[in-house]
Amino acid sequence: MQETDINAGLSSTLNIVNNELKYKATVTREFGELPIISANPQQLNQVFANILVNAAQAIVDKGEIRVATRHVD
């Protein structure tokens, strides 16, 4: 467990899976301001990558993947 910035993790993961996404979808990022959390960033990034690749694989032609974060009290 370590201090983790979810937005930074998502950005990093989007860069890593970009080659798989760019032919299937336009990716829209809407990152809100989030607090730093205590988590395992590698595990979170793996989950994000799996979700993003699955989303791209579910698109038949060309689509959009929208990634948004926000903090709710």
Image (cartoon, rainbow, N blue to C red):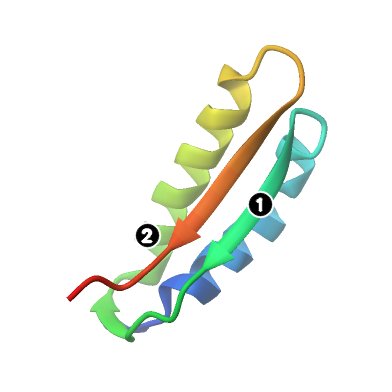
Tell me the kind of residue under disc 2.
Leu
Q: Are marks 2 and 1 in contact (CB under 8 Å)?
A: no
- Residue at the spot of label 2: 44
**Relative to 62, residue 18 above or below:** below
Looking at the image, residue 39 sits to the left or right of residue 12; the answer is: left
Residue 55 disc label: none
Q: Where's residue 65, x and y in %? A: 61, 39
Left or right for 24, reference 64: right
Q: Position of residue 58 (x, y in %)?
A: 56, 18
For image coordinates 75% across by 28% down, the residue present is 24
The picture places residue 18, in percent across and down from the top left corner, at: 74, 48
Q: Is residue 38 above or below residue 50?
A: below
> Residue tagged by mark 1?
28
Which is in the foreground here, disc 2 or disc 1?
A: 1
Q: Residue furthest right?
A: 23
Residue 11 seen by the camera: yes
Residue 17 in view of the camera: no
